[in-house]
Amino acid sequence: MATTQAPARVGDTLPDITLPKLGGGELNLSDLRGKRVLLYMWGSW
């Protein structure tokens, strides 16, 4: 059973996610708290 959530809105707190950095290591979204962040994700399937 799938649960639905309301879409995120400007100013909402997002869940902490961890992304790999191109030069190695990881970046946590929480490390950028208080800064403006643009997440641009794409994929090619």
Image: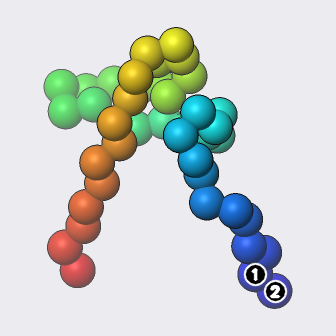
Residue 1 marker:
2
Amino acid bearing label 1: Ala
Q: Which SS class for mark 2?
A: loop
Residue 22 placement: quadrant:
top left
Going 30% across and 54% down the picture, which residue do you hit? 41
Task: Please rate how many residues cluster around mark 1, counting C-alpha atoms within 10 Å: few if below 14, some from 14 to 19, many from 20.
Answer: few
Residue 36 placement: quadrant:
top left
Q: Is residue 15 visible?
A: yes
Residues tagged 2 and 1 counted as in contact (Cβ below 8 A)? yes
Q: Which SS class for mark 1?
A: loop
Q: Residue at label 1?
A: 2
Point out the image quarter for the C terminus.
bottom left
Point out the image quarter for the N terminus.
bottom right
Q: Is residue 35 above or below residue 3?
A: above
Q: How is the image coloured?
A: rainbow
Left or right of residue 19: residue 44:
left
Residue found at the far bottom of this picture: 1
Locate residue 3, reporting x and y percent.
78, 75
Q: Is residue 16 visible?
A: no
Going 59% across and 51% down the picture, which residue do you hit? 8
Locate residue 18, reporting x and y percent.
49, 36
Task: Please rate how many residues cluster around mark 2, counting C-alpha atoms within 10 Å: few if below 14, some from 14 to 19, many from 20.
Answer: few
Going 25% across and 61% down the picture, which residue do you hit? 42
Q: Depth check: 7 or 23 in front?
A: 7
Q: Measure the C-alpha gap from mark 2 to mark 1.
A: 4 Å
